[in-house]
Amino acid sequence: MQGICIIGNDGAGKTTTANLISNLYPNTKVVSFASALKDDLNLLRLPVHQKPYSTELRAFIRSYGDLQRQLNSDTYWVERLFSSLESCSSSVNSHSSSPIVQFATIPSSIQPEEWLVVDDMRYWSELNAWTNKFKTNTRIITLGSIQDTTNAIGQSVIEVNQLLTTLRKDTTRNMLHIPNNKEITKEELTNLISNYLSNNK
């Protein structure tokens, strides 16, 4: 299994890119760290499942996410994500001895050759946790300029590359940087991603 994370500023097209991957590869599962956060806030009857958000609501959502990281750990939302996937696995196949289920709390419906895509990677600690989980099967797609990546993840593209170097010396197999994603057509974006993923399984 390949673990793909998509990095970019708000409005960069992260979810669009994740859906594009899902269309290219039907056995893709798109997940979001924000799902658990929105579930929490939904209990407060906040309209977190209705976009576009107001400036005030977006700020509140971020503040709540940051608060949970401070109260628990930097990787709180990563842990919530994998915990929910583990629960899904257990309910689908509670008697299975599949190494995929045991490995990292991935739903048993996802096979080794398939993709798990997170479309809202925003923190360096979360990126580290993701790469620790998937090791050399980590794939990273960054959208926007080098400065956009720095703003989105809190670290530069160079530092992301250094992280990937610890996984595999050839970082080009791990990372696809698309600086002009807002200027290319959907077809061009599809071709870039298709070539990258098909050549790096």
Image (tube, rainbow, N blue to C red):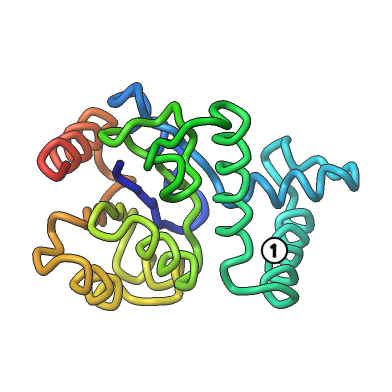
Q: Residue at x 41, y 69 (%)?
A: 128
Q: What secondary structure is found at the residue carrying circle 1?
A: helix
- The amino acid type found where label 1 is placed reads Gly
Mark 1 surroundings within 10 Å by alpha-carbon count, few (fewer than 14), some (14 through 19), many (20 or more): some
Q: Position of residue 150 (x, y in %)?
A: 39, 72
Q: Residue at x 14, y 36 (%)?
A: 198
Q: Residue at x 61, y 59 (%)?
A: 77
User: Which residue in the protein does label 1 denote?
Assistant: 65
Q: Residue furthest right?
A: 44
Q: Height in image: 172 above or below 184?
A: below
Q: Residue at x 14, y 54 (%)?
A: 173
> Which quarter of the rendered picture does the N terminus lie within?
top left
Instruction: Examine the image and state in which quarter residue 155 appears.
Output: bottom left
Q: Height in image: 168 above or below 183?
A: below
Q: Is residue 102 left or right of residue 141?
A: right
Q: Position of residue 141 (x, y in %)?
A: 30, 52
Instruction: Examine the image and state in which quarter residue 18 appears.
Output: top left
Task: Report how many numbered discs are placed on residues in the image.
Answer: 1
Of residues 142 and 39, the one drawn nearer to the viewer in this rendering: 39
Instruction: Examine the image and state in which quarter residue 193 appears.
Output: top left
Q: Position of residue 56 (x, y in %)?
A: 78, 58
> Which quarter of the rendered picture does the C terminus lie within?
top left
Of residues 107 and 23, the one drawn nearer to the viewer in this rendering: 107
Of residues 171 and 166, the one drawn nearer to the viewer in this rendering: 166
Q: Is residue 12 left or right of residue 1?
A: right
